[in-house]
Image (cartoon, coloured by chain):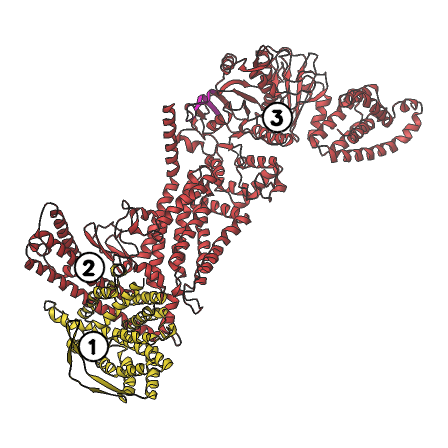
Chain colours: A red, B yellow
Amino acid sequence: MSEEILKALTQLFAIISKQDGGVTNAERDFVIEYFRLELDTKTVEEYIALFDQFAEYGIATKEVSDKEKRKNKRKLTNVRDSVRTLAICKKINKTLNQQQKVIVLIKLLELVASDRSFTSQRMEIINTVSTVFNIPTEEYKLIESFVFEAHSSQIDHEDILIFDNDKPSEGSKLKYIDSGQLDGEIIFIRVKSVGAYFTKYTGKDEIYLNGQLVKHESVIQFAPGSVFKTPKGAPLYYSDLVSTYNTDQEVDNISFNVHDLEFKFPNGTIGFQNINLSESNGNLIGIMGASGAGKTTLLNVLAGLESPSKGNVLINGYNVHSQQDTDKIEGVIGYVSQDDLLIEELTVYQNLFYNAKLCFGDISDEEIDKRVMAVLTSLGLEKRAHLKVGSPLNKKISGGQRKRLNIALELIREPAIMFVDEPTSGLSSRDSENVIDLLKELSLRGKLIFVVIHQPSSDIFKMFDKMLIMDTGGFPIFMGNPIEAVTYFKSASRQVGSDRGQCATCGNVNPEQIFNIIESRVVDEYGEFTNKRKVQPEEWYKMYLDHFSLERLENVKEDPPSTLKIPSRIKQTLIFSVRDFLSKISNLQYLTINLLEAPFLALLISWVIRYRGSSDGEYIFRHNDNIPAYILICVVAALFMGMSVSAEEIIRDRKILKRETFLNLSRFSYLTSKVLILFAFSAIQTVSFVLIGNLVLGIDGLHFMYWLALFTASCHANVIGLNISSAFNSAVTVYILIPLLLIPQLIASGVIFDYDKLNNSISDKGKVPLVADFMASRWTYEGIAVEHFKSNKYEENLFEFEVLEKSNSFKSSYWKPKLDEIINQTSSLLSNKNDSTAPIIQSNILLLKRELRNDFYTKSQKVNIDSLVNEDRFSSEENTQALREYFNQVAQFYTLGFIRASESKDSVLYKMKDDLPEGIDQSQFKDKYYNDCLEEIVRNTTVEDRVVVSDGKVVQLMDPIFNIPSLNRSLLDYRVHFYAPVKPFLGKLFNTYTFNLMFIWAMTFILFMTLYFDVLSRIITWFGSITQNVGKKSK
Amino acid sequence: MKKFYLGISALVYILILSNTALASKMNDNPKVVVLSQPYSVSDDAIMQILQAIPSPLEISMLIKELGTVYNKTDLNNSDFVSKYNTSFKKALNLGVYGTDLGFANIYSKNQDALNYLSSVKKLADGLSIGQFFDYQTIKKLAESANNFDELLMTTTSNFEKINYHLSQQGRDHLSILLLTGGWIEALHITTIVQQRSKHEDLKVKIAEQKIVLDQILKVLQMFKTKPEFPGLISDLNELKKVYNEISIETTYGQPTTQEVNGMLVVMDNNSSTVKVTDAQIDKITSLIRSVRNKIIR
């Protein structure tokens, strides 16, 4: 207390006591006593002098004779004193909090009561004081009668409680706790407005409050954690008092029963064992223990986050860990983890608001806003409401405020049972106290709260109703009142003064003392501590079993109360999306990089590869040899951006997801919201990429085609990113994984390495290898390349004729000569038939048959293939000749087709020339839309062997873009050569671009399903457990 | 490498020249059943005419022997290949590039030869006769051949196949275009060099082309219904008008036989006199340039 305030108080004392007859000795003694409590001996003298001066002590006695004079003065003095009183009170108002003001008021009343002269003057002044202090009148009256009345029977009020052996009379509002044999009574008053309790003792027994002798008739504050000890009866704990006061409140009825709970880690070590609890609502229960004693694990199991290996946890009879009871438990449990579970990019208000929206689907936004503001106000965070939470490194709000906000997130939906893990770690003692105060208040409002606490201060320690102390190995070794714990362990270790739990003079408890005793070590002969403990955990546990017996509460028969009303899936998706969106746009750096990355890359790439093929210095799109590479780079960039933007998404949210498991929110909604936001990002990124890249390179009229394909690839990468983000536990791992996922996409894209020249075990001549079918890069690249070649403005009209021209030309110029070769080979082999040539002959005949069976002309002529091609056919040159002639006939058919197509194509070219607007010649038109290098790639003109025999068939390696796959295949067989213009599927031919994009979307959908069912994570866990088992066996 | 390009240029020349062989080949193949030919032209007639056309290679060699400097701008730009879209243009310019390739090769301009080779390949691919320009085969030939003659021998047969192929497909009009293109380019180069060097031999060479032009026009006439042919025919007819003013008189002598190194060789004793003025040569020069520019643009 500051000097100023003490002086002000002294003045108040003086003013009151000098009224109506001046200061009596009793009053002066009271003041001196008060000073002695507050000050050291030297200063006490000083203040007594000050008091005497203000109270005109001594002067007054001299003037006793001069009564007349004083009476004249009296009115004047009154007015002056009133003004002074007002001034002093205002000064006090500025410094003291409400509780301290109540204490001052009680002191003043005690002063008056000390000589029991309740004159109107004095009472008037005190009344003024209470008004200025803003103490409610009714409460003031109650305090007044509590101080003045000698016996509880004079006061009949619900805020009064007596601790006595005599019950109050029937019909009295007084509350009562049985004290056992006691002289007089201990009266308690609850000052509701400040939530404080005061007490006084009217009897003559030796009563101890926190180990200190209580003075008869003096009013003392009954602070949290205090304990009264009477000579005969049981001690009275603060928590008992509070719960007695609160019995008439309407609270949820909850039973929390834990039976023989045990938890084993996957590697077999024991987390904790033999935990038995039985608690009801309205309790604040602490869990303490040495580090590694399994406190947090216990909390997680109690909260249902992890399943026990033995035993069960029942809330009102419903098993927390059973699947079938989840809907009953839903929303009953709140969990505040040790880590901050905040969305750092959002403001304090937004964090709470969206959390509340997810909890209350049936409440309007205005109502939620009201609730949020109410919670924020009650936590003293209302002024911080619109500050960003910020990361622990980049602090916007203090650690204490973060912690309170964490609790607020659970608080807002008011779960009946809350689990709080180390809420005070890393906080200042002031903040710690605030946080525990908050929890205490909640428990007083009827919640059941479990708190893992580490190194609590004395005040905090005393606030708990019960304390569970655990020792290494997960043994419970104490369960009960926290202060008792000190005495219990002291007496167990036969220490001096074991009956005193707290310091006799200051009332402090030292919780560390407990652990010093529990873990005290044996000293060796040199006086050094050894590693051996004096008392092993098992021994403590044995002692625990001897000393503590659990009173089992009946399981409450009703359903546990839940305020939760989660919104529909669509609504959840919407809320998740909005929340995610807000958090993203508030991170300016993230947003800028994400949005500028794509256009910047596009500009860089396209500018660098804007190559001038011609020597006259003008850029001609047609001669840019980099277009196929550009397409690949576009695809890789889309995949890369898509993957990196999503790779951290779920990891970052994991903590928040953990908290939200208690809400039983829809994972589908959550993932959908992620996907929606990421797809939106991908859309924007790919739009800017395509626009800039294509503009710089002069790719005209194909923007949408490019965009849709890249968007598809990017979305696919988004979902891959989400998968790994959901399966792995650190961002670093995920980023290390990205190359592992991207480089195969590059290798198997078909651009960098030729599909026909891959390792023979995966390569399949004339078909895209199966491994490449899992690569979105290959589908996207092929889709764009084929579509670009097919539908650019120059080629779009020509394409069908070129297909006819080239496919006919292939048949007559390559296919038929190849078969001629085979016929020649066969007939020459047959002439000297032996064991080694026989299989070759057979396979050649099969090949010829197969080719003819797939041949369009042969099919249309309904030729009997078996009679045309058989072994007998090669027996003589004459017989063979007939076959040769048939093939000549086939070739002529195709030649004719080729010439017709070629002429039609020329006529289209002439028509195109005529249709072109004035001033643009055909070459210019082609320069603008056609690309030679792309043509070279999709026509595979550089291939050495244009046609090969592989796997019993003739495979066309040239002109893949003009090679229409045959439909003579099974319905689901989509596998054809790279750059096919159309794809067969389900007996139909689909445009390659359409088919490829649909294929990617199908893969994306499957990946979304694996994400939804968390397949990858399960595989990793399963794999982890296998390696662990193997490791164990090898040990 | 030089051999390699030489091989290619030889291929192109032979492609042009070996039309001659085609006629006899066709007659040797009675088994071929021609299903239908959209433009029926008497093969024999074409072949007889084409037989008389001299090789552009001959002119190139002559030019080099005169000691003229190689000038790249006299030739077609190899980048122009991208301008040719129709079969007509492709075939004509395949001829043009063939001449250019040979010219560059004779002067050992490897880089240029490579560029022309790539253009030739592109056009051949475009005409679907790319299979006869198989790099791999030609490369092997070039590596294995010890001298130019041997390479010529080996590749000749390949090019007979091309002609056979085109003819069998009923695409004779492409053969004549190929030939015309090669001839026009050769004549163009000759006129330019002549303008520079004013060499008498070249003048005669230019004038002598009168016969060739007549024959080419005869063949082209057969395809006049095909698109783009009329333009070319009328351009060449303009040229023909100039040539008509030139007279070539041939004196026929009796062929004699003579023994050379123990072999009996027949000596041709015919000789011809050409009457041509500088003005006529100038006119031919400018006309052939405009015809050629139309083709390559």
Q: Are marks 1 and 3 on the same chain?
A: no
Q: Is residue A605 visible in the rendered structure shown here?
A: yes
Q: Earlier in the sequence, mark 2 or mark 3?
A: 3
Relative placement, left or right, of A647 versus A77 is left
Q: Which disc number belongs to residue A815?
A: 2
Image location of residue A606, percent across then percent down: 45, 59
Could one spot residue A668 in this view of the protein? no
Residue that label 3 marks: A460
**Circle 3 chain:** A
Of the residues tagged 1 and 2, which is closer to the observer?
A: 1
Name which residue type carries label 2.
Trp
Label 1 sits on residue: B50
Amino acid bearing label 3: Ile
Question: Do residues under tags 2 and 3 come within 8 Å of each other at their CB atoms?
Answer: no
The answer to whether B123 is drawn above or below residue B203 in the figure is: above
Q: Residue at x 46, y 49 (%)?
A: A677
In the image, is A587 to the left or to the right of A880? right
Q: Name the mark nearer the viewer: 2 or 3.
A: 2
The secondary structure making up most of the magenta span is strand
Specify the segment rendered in magenta: A254-275
- Label 1 environment density (alpha carbons within 10 Å; few <14, some 14–19, many ≥20): many
> Circle 2 sits in a helix, a strand or a loop, which is it?
helix
Secondary structure of the residue carrying numbered label 1: helix
A361 or B3: which is nearer to us?
Answer: B3
Q: Nearer the viewer, residue A455 or A139?
A: A455
